[in-house]
Image (tube, rainbow, N blue to C red):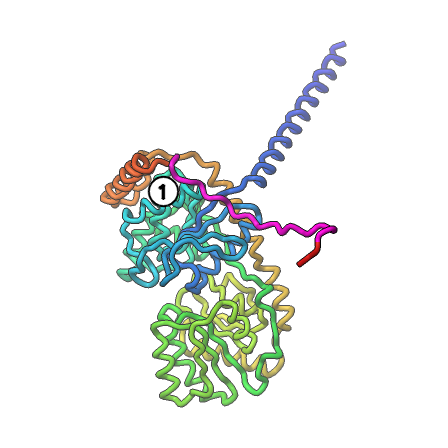
Amino acid sequence: MCRELSNTSDVLNYIQRIARIILLHETCFNLIVNMNIIKHKICMVSDFFYPNMGGVEEHIFNLSQCLMELGHKVVVLTHSYGDRIGVRYMTNGLKVYYIPVKVFYNQCVLPTMICSIPLIRYIFLREEIQIVHGHSAFSALAHEGMLIGRLMGLKTIFTDHSLFGFADASAILTNKFLEISLADCNHCICVSHTGKENTVLRAKVLKEKVSVIPNAVDTTLFMPDISKRDDNFITIVIVSRLVYRKGVDLLARIIPDLCSRYKNVQFLIAGDGPKRWLIEEVRERNLLQHRVTLLGSLEHSQIRHVLNKGHIFLNTSLTEAYCMAIVEAASCGLQVVSTKVGGIPEVLPPDLIYLVEPTVPALISGLESAIADYKEGNTRCPFEMHRRISLFYNWFNITKRTEIVYNLVKQENKKNLGQQLASYVQSGVLAYLLVVSLCYIILQILEILVPQKYIDIAKDYAEINVIQPRGDEKED
């Protein structure tokens, strides 16, 4: 009798455990389903956006397009470019606010912190924004937008696209300002593991609050086309802004040396910047007008045609968190020679890139190795390279990973003003608390003068459905 009771109790315990497991699985399943159906309203904020060209601009545009494809609402906020002021719609109805703020330096606005509050608050409320996503540590508008968003109770995310040093005065000031700005940020995203280490060290952000999500390339736009190559020459392509950070000084010393060694080598340079005069001077001094071509600033849609004319791609950057140009070049089937700095070693596998130190002898040695491999036929098939790159980097994969960050941030508790001020105290700049308090007071005054209930809500963009003519109607 006791044995029967014991067996019965065991069965009951077993059934209860099974019921708990089933309940747990149902809970997890419901959580996953809810996370998948959550649709966010996101505002991308940065000083860098079209018509300006660059890696940050392309990242914001492609990420926004893929987020919209997944059903999220995305709005971009940037400053005016020339006569491009107001609201513009881009591909698939991407809404862009070009606010009337003048550029102060290097395509960035003056960081006043308070002058743009009424306009930015109006846009956030009108678009019913839930998450403010700032891009680039250089962007003053991104930091202003995140500050205003936090004071309005919105979630904030910051993506760092660059690496900084720790020694020079500009880096010290920028790092301190970034530490203040990210003290109350919900989450940070870096484009490489090297970039994550750099951001954690210089901005003193908890490593648990930093995720690594790389950039990607639309490989359908960068298809190999070897028919455009000139077989009489070995063409070395450079696609970069002509600034010091991109190693233009190294390039200026490489060009005459390599041209004197190889009579069938020519350079094709796309990009513009304050260091362009140096390349032009080297070309004129060494009489290389017929072998060094400067194309100037190009639209991103034209980069593919430039890359397909080349055999070797050269990157001479002195610092780089993630170089999209080398991924685009590899997607077009070019041999890639690049400096081994920052997060570049993480971007491509060793068999698709020649990594060298950022010195003139090392770069020349890397180029000579690439030239020798090309002459001997020891190169990868361009179409095989394209296939591999398309597997490595995909915008929809990057978007899915970013969406996970949005879902995690959305579940965090809302902070009151006291908790936000306590976060800024850790940065050690107590005067900044006065700035945050002043911004909060201005927002409260604006809520009295222009209440949220009096601000019209913008209608979400929807594709226009074309009404097909019925059978009894004649088509025009």
Q: Quadrant of residue 287?
A: bottom left
Q: Secondary structure at mark 1?
A: helix
- The residue beneath circle 1 is 184
Q: Quadrant of residue 18?
A: top right
Residue 337 higher or lower than 155, as above or below: below
- Asked if the magenta segment contains residue 445, the reply would be no
At x 48%, y 79%, the residue is 268
Q: Residues within 10 Å of mark 1 (few under 14, many from 20)?
A: many
Q: Is residue 425 visible?
A: no
Residue 35 higher or lower than 109, as above or below: above
Q: Please give the count of numbered marks on the rendered protein.
A: 1
- Asked if the magenta segment contains residue 469, the reply would be yes
Q: Magenta residues?
A: 453-473
At x 53%, y 67%, the residue is 328
Q: Is residue 181 visible?
A: yes
Amino acid found under the numbered disc labelled 1: Asp
- 134 vs 168, nearest the viewer: 134
